Amino acid sequence: MMEPHRDPAMAAAPGASTRVVVLAGGVGGARLSHGVARLPGVELTVVVNTGDDLELHGLAISPDVDTVLYTLAGVANPETGWGLRDETWSAHGMLARYGAPTWFRLGDRDLATQLVRTRRFRDGATPTDVTGELAQALGVRARILPMSDRPVRTHVRTHGGWLEFQEWFVARGHADDVLEVRFDGVEDARPTERVLTSIAAADAILVAPSNPFVSIGTILALPGMVAALLAAAAPVVAVSPIVAGAALKGPADRMFETLGGESSALGVARHYAGAFPGLVDGLVIDGADRDQAAAIGQLGIRTLVTSAIMRDEDDRVRLAGEVLGFATELRRDEQRRNEG
């Protein structure tokens, strides 16, 4: 068990440029990525889940990609973590008057993003290309990469049958217990070459505190993804999305209970160790879960105990610095073992 690094800048600056890859879902992934992006001497790549994507009103919508995009651009709604700050809803109101589906809310400026994305897709551009164009237009310096350029769609099985992810998550308010998860199209999808190149060149790979089943799990389900991560020289450090038995955001705690396991930091460690043996080298857990560190260590996963809750931007930078410092120390320890 390690105590947190107190100086994020010092912890995150082992060299002139530290190449960091973050595997991210929505809000939790966006916030950790934002913290990493603000550290000095970091070259950031964010690999984002696209299993939550959907088509609505004839538009191609990528909710997790957009949450990361808006957060790194500094224009995200600080109250929700998704959508845009100071958004207006005139188009949404007109859609309601026309009787169109309004369960998935698109603000006026958010709608512009979806219009541009859809037009570029129709022009033949890939999700990777379009995301890069949007990021450049919003002044984002980090590289944001969809996990694949091929479509993958997450579905969940409930007591009422199979549901598309957004129907379950947004339309039904994720009230239904999830009994099974599947990723339609994943067999034909692959990580893009840019994703694989970024992983191979990384100095640290961070798994954001996103849902292990339907955010991170979707990324890891891509054929070749786990093999690429295992082959990388960089350590893989995950941040637990469970603190004191509860999810930081969303239904991950309930999913641990219905899909097997336990809703705890130890449950997160057991999930990753069981589903992806040898993948996660370190796990960052909150001080409230300090008593679980020894049991996590018995799984072969080292722990960093710190405050894992990102309440504001200062917390994001602090946590990012501590996580990156932890990853740097793990890599140095591995290098010493190899040299010895």
Image (spheres, grey):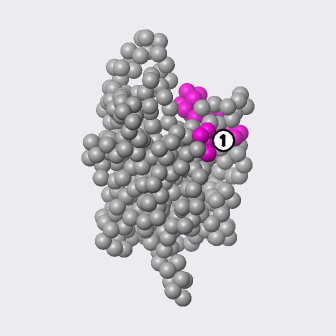
> In the picture provided, is 50 more to the left or to the right than 117?
right
Residue 215 x/y as whole percent: 55, 46
Front position in the image: 72 or 220: 220
- The residue depicted at 70 percent of the width and 30 percent of the height is 161
Q: Is residue 235 magenta?
A: no
Measured as percent of width and height from the top left, residue 246 is found at 59, 48
**Residue found at the very far front of the displayed protein:** 124
Residue 193 showing in the rendered view = yes
Identify the amino acid type marked 1. Val
The residue singled out by tag 1 in the image is 181
Where is 246 relative to 156, above or below?
below
**Which residue range is magenta in the image?**
165-187
User: Who's the residue at 39% across and 36% down the image?
Assistant: 124
Q: Position of residue 78 (x, y in %)?
A: 37, 41
Q: Nearer the viewer, residue 106 or 257?
A: 106
Q: Residue at x 54, y 62 (%)?
A: 229
Residue 42 % position (x, y)? 34, 63
Residue 250 or residue 311, whichever sits in front: 250
Q: Which residue is depicted at the point 61% across and 38% down?
A: 184
Q: Is residue 314 left or right of residue 278?
A: left
In the picture, which quadrant includes the N terminus? Answer: bottom right
Quarter in which the C terminus is drawn: bottom right
Q: Quadrant of residue 266?
A: bottom right
Decide: is 251 above or below 175: below
Please identify the quarter of the rendering in which residue 254 is found: top right
**For the view shown, which residue lies furthest in the bottom direction?**
340
Q: Quick check: is 175 in the magenta stretch?
A: yes
Instruction: Decide: is 33 above or below 69.
Output: below
